């Protein structure tokens, strides 16, 4: 009887000991994650819709199918796309802020968020390119406060310009400058009958 009690007591002590070790490892992991990737500045996900109407009117006035997407406008478009992709984020990941900076064919995305409640900040490097009527951002590397991860961790971000400009115009060329994107369009008259029948 006393042998059974001492065995039960030993089993309970082992269970408490194992649970304690798991808790210590979990807490140490959370603290390490916070230390390695704590956000360095406050950002938000507020964005303003890009005024494409004035851009379209300017193209009509100048009779040139060409417009510019400024640094700020690109940031607004990319933030909106990030918010629209929220359901694709891994479980436990919540974005709380973003700032996208364009430099020729490179984009730096300064992101903040939480992962299972632990705040983090990261800078993601992207290569930007055109594919038909889309801006494509291909992830290259991730930088956190105390470390770097090379290679793509997320799938390409696709920003459709047909969401913002008439379907009768297709993108014919994009030039990526230091702080803006020069976009040239060509008319797609074949799509006009479809648009008129809507």
Image (cartoon, helix red, strand yellow):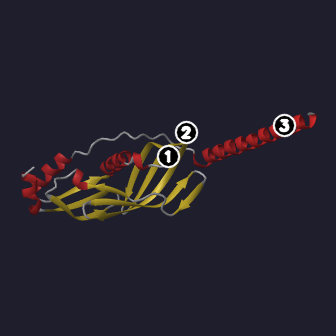
Mark 3 or mark 2: which comes first in sequence? 3
As helix, strand or loop, the secondary structure at mark 3 comes to: helix
Left or right placement of residue 153 versus residue 136 in this view: right
Left or right placement of residue 106 versus residue 123 in this view: left
Q: Position of residue 182 (x, y in %)?
A: 25, 60
Q: Mark 1 points at which residue?
A: 91
Q: Distance between the residues labelled 1 and 3?
A: 39 Å
As helix, strand or loop, the secondary structure at mark 2 comes to: loop
Q: Residue at 82% x, 38% y: name it.
A: 13
Q: Mark 3 points at which residue?
A: 8
Residue 188, picture quadrant: bottom left
Of residue 150 and residue 184, the one placed in the foreground of this image is: 150
Of residue 191 and residue 14, the one placed in the foreground of this image is: 14
Q: Where is residue 98 in the image (x, y as percent from the top left)?
A: 42, 46
Q: Mark 2 points at which residue?
A: 117
Residue 39 visible at all: no
Q: Does 7 appear above or below 61?
A: above
Q: Residues within 10 Å of mark 3 (few under 14, many from 20)?
A: few
Q: How far apart are marks 2 and 1 (CA)?
A: 11 Å
Q: Distance between the residues labelled 3 and 2?
A: 37 Å
């Amino acid at each position: 009887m006393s042998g059974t009690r001492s065995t039960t007591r030993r089993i309970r002590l082992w269970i408490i000991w194992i649970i304690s070790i798991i808790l210590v490892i979990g807490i140490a992991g959370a603290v390490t994650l916070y230390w390695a990737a704590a956000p360095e500045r406050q950002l938000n996900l507020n964005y303003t819709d890009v005024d494409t109407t004035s851009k379209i009117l300017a193209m009509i006035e100048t009779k040139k199918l060409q417009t510019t997407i400024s640094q700020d406008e690109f940031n607004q478009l990319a933030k909106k796309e990030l918010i629209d992709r929220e359901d694709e984020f891994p479980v436990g990941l919540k974005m709380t802020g973003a700032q996208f900076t364009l430099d020729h064919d490179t984009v730096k995305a300064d992101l903040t968020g939480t992962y299972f409640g632990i705040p983090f900040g990261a800078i993601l490097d992207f290569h930007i390119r055109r594919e038909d009527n889309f801006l494509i951002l291909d992830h290259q590397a991730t930088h956190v406060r105390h470390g770097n991860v090379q290679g793509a961790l997320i799938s390409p971000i696709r920003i459709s310009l047909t969401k913002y400009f008439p379907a009768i115009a297709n993108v014919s060329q994009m030039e990526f400058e230091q702080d803006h994107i020069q976009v040239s369009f060509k008319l797609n008259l074949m799509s006009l009958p479809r648009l008129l029948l809507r």
